[in-house]
Image (cartoon, rainbow, N blue to C red):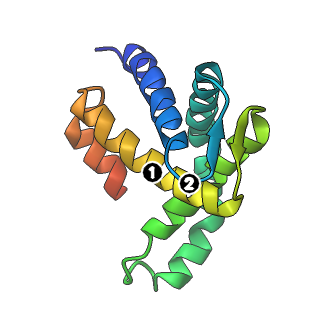
Amino acid sequence: MGHSLVWLLQWPVRAVILLLITRLPLGVEMVSFRIALVSALVISLAGTLLAPLLGAILTPFKMITTLGGLLPVGFLFEWLISILLFGFTAWLIQGFRLRNGLVSAALGSLVYSFASFFLLRVLGLVPWLRAMGQFSGSPLA
């Protein structure tokens, strides 16, 4: 399947995941499926365009706090990037609200990441090998 077609199939799945997150007591609010579609698009684009920049900015802090990678807490920096992207999207999209601010962004981004990771693999929209590479930061991705 072509990369563009796979992404187009992932997009509504990610929007449904956002809507499901609004059903959890996390403080994430979405007014409609249309807003969820737009939000999923913005999160994906922001992740593609801004995540590398944020990662570069945070790299010196990551190296210091993980003692050059010796301490296994590097995933916290990826989570921080996810929180920032989730919060940025909520700030940008009218109809996507984080009722509890940073707490809602942190919990919402965590659930969104894990739910997307597993559901897209179960549906066969991303191969497991590529997914594990993304999850672990491996160059296989």
Q: Residues within 10 Å of mark 2 (few under 14, many from 20)?
A: some
- The answer to whether residue 111 is visible is yes
Residue at disc 1, secondary structure: helix
What amino acid is found at the position of numbered circle 1 in the picture? Answer: Val
The residue to which callout 2 is attached is 26
Identify whether 139 is placed above or below 103: above
| Left or right: 93 as drawn, with respect to 63 | right
Q: Position of residue 123 (x, y in %)?
A: 25, 27
Q: Quadrant of residue 37?
A: top right
Identify whether 141 is placed above or below 76: above
Q: How crowded is mark 1: few (under 14 residues within 10 Å), some or many (20 or more)?
A: some
Q: Where is residue 52 in the image (x, y as percent from the top left)?
A: 58, 49
For the point 55% across and 41% down, which residue is it? Answer: 22
From the viewer's side, name the closer residue of 132 and 88.
Answer: 88
Rendered image: mark on residue 137: none
Q: If the image is split into quadrants, where does the N terminus sit?
A: top left
Identify whether 72 is placed above or below 36: below
Distance from Cα at disc 1 to Cα at disc 2:
9 Å
The residue to which callout 1 is attached is 111
Q: How many marks?
A: 2
Identify whether 18 is placed above or below 59: above
What amino acid is found at the position of numbered circle 2 in the picture? Answer: Leu
Residue at disc 2, secondary structure: loop
For the point 34% across and 14% down, which residue is it? Answer: 2
For the point 38% across and 20% down, which residue is it? Answer: 3
- The answer to whether residue 55 is visible is no
Q: Quadrant of residue 48?
A: top right
| Left or right: 40 as drawn, with respect to 70 | right
For the point 38% across and 83% down, which residue is it? Answer: 71
Q: Where is residue 141 in the image (x, y as percent from the top left)?
A: 33, 42
Q: Do the residues labelled 1 and 2 touch (CB within 8 Å)?
A: yes
